[in-house]
């Protein structure tokens, strides 16, 4: 299930490189929202959330999915560091995971 979720996210949510951190973050948010709103992903998300309290393996797989996906998305911040948009000590995960 984790592999299927990562494959779907990889196909549907590419890591943008527009030349601007702000534009990249907005592009990522738009594609992630569109993917999450698709019937397939919405159904899978509901099923996972409903079963996680009862299935520790599913909860662990969900956690691994988000760890891997957020690490991939961190490339946006790494690109911004290389362009000099943000300080070199900026933590990609903290930017991507900010709420």
Image (cartoon, helix red, strand yellow):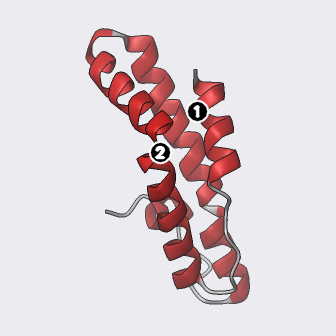
Image quarter of the C terminus:
bottom left
The circle on residue 85 is none
Q: Which mark is residue 38?
A: 2
Q: Earlier in the sequence, mark 1 or mark 2?
A: 1
Quadrant of res 79: bottom right
x%, y% of residue 61?
A: 50, 23
Tell me where residue 11 appears, x and y as whole percent: 70, 47
Q: Which quadrant of the view contains residue 7?
A: top right
> Quadrant location of residue 49?
top left
Q: Residue at x 62, y 79 (%)?
A: 88
Query: Residue 57 appears at what percent x and percent y?
Result: 45, 13
Q: Secondary structure at mark 1?
A: helix
Which residue is at the front of the view, 18 or 56? 18
Identify the residue under disc 1. 5
The structure residue drawn at horizontal position 66% and vertical position 89%, both measured from the top left corner, is: 84
Residue name at image x 47 percent, y 65 percent: 29
CA gap, disc 1 to disc 2?
Answer: 13 Å
**Can you say whether 72 is above or below 62 in the image?**
below
């Amino acid at each position: 299930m984790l592999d299927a979720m990562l494959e779907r996210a990889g196909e549907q949510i590419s890591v943008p490189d527009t030349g601007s951190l702000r534009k990249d973050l907005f592009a990522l948010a738009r594609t992630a929202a569109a993917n999450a709103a698709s019937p397939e992903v919405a159904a899978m998300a509901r099923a996972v959330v409903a079963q996680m309290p009862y299935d520790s393996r599913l909860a662990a797989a969900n956690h691994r999915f988000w760890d891997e996906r957020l690490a991939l998305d961190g490339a946006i911040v790494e690109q911004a560091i290389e362009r000099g948009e943000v300080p070199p000590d900026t933590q990609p995960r903290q930017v991507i995971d900010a709420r």
